[in-house]
Amino acid sequence: MSTVIQENPVDVVCLGVGFMSGVVATELALAGNSVVGITKGPYWDYVNDYSTTKYDEWGVGLGRKYDSPLPLQSTTIRNNINQFALPVRRYTMPIQYHALGHGVGGAAQHYGGGMGRFGPWAYEMASRTASAYGSGFLASINPQDDTHDWPLTYAEYEPYYVEWEKAHGICGNYNGSPTNSPSDINYPWMSRNYPLPPHPMTPLAQLFQSTVQGMTAPNGQKYNPFP
């Protein structure tokens, strides 16, 4: 039987308190609204469940301990378009299926920690591809192609990237290199750098870098992780 919850009325009720809903709830509250979030699952104990001295790689990566249990929210998959999609019965790979968070915070509890941007080309994929290779190029390699440009351009979305990165304290360099030299920017479409500097390199990463540089491995070309 369902139970009627008797609580004081509020302006907004958010169903689910994950990454997106949490941001929406925060913005609504900052705007002066009273907000309540309702979600399924536990309220994680950050001291015990996220111990920095005992990271449970197996439980998080393979056991998917922070994901929504499959009996509650399953995913269907198929290997090709001719198969009938069937429900997933168990997680078999760390990244095989979408990370459906469970509990307060949702998938934000255990996402990969990467916050990238789509570049300008991604928002105008159809028109830019047609301009570079001809209007029939995409259809020639995929007769069922239905690629379209986004309704807005990167320049129109960019202020929201900046606001999001500032709100979440994103770390990094917009030139993709440890030096962050203004003369070596690989991402000229970014109007400003990330709000926080990149994380310090680990001792192992420092050893790898010094070893590779000592072997004169760099090819002399400006480094770009997204050629």
Image: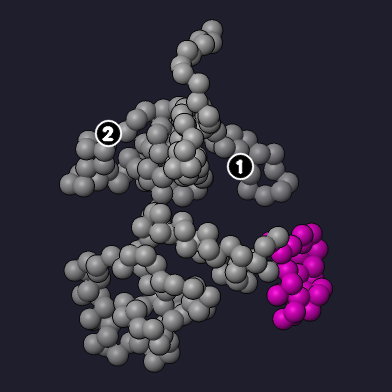
Q: Position of residue 83 (x, y in %)?
A: 70, 43
Q: Would you identify the image quadrant in which residue 204 lies?
A: bottom left
Asked whether residue 217 appears in the rendered view, the answer is yes
Q: What residue sits 46% from the left and 35% below the top?
A: 17
Q: What residue sits 27% from the left and 85% below the top?
A: 213
Q: Nearer the viewer, residue 172 or 220?
A: 172
Asked whether residue 62 appears in the rendered view, the answer is no
> Where 179 falls versus 166 (above or below)?
below
Residue 45 numbered tag: 2
> Where 181 falls versus 76 (above or below)?
below
**Mark 2 crowd level (few <14, some 14–19, many ≥20, 10 Å Cα):** few
Residue 166 numbered tag: none
Q: Would you identify the image quadrant in which residue 119 lies?
A: bottom right
Q: Position of residue 102 (x, y in %)?
A: 43, 34
Mark 2: amino acid: Asp
> Where 19 falls versus 177 (above or below)?
above
Disc 2 from disc 1: Cα separation: 33 Å
Give, as a single range, the part of the protein colored magenta.
Answer: 126-150
User: How many numbered marks have been drawn onto this rendered protein structure?
Assistant: 2
Residue at which label 1 appears = 77
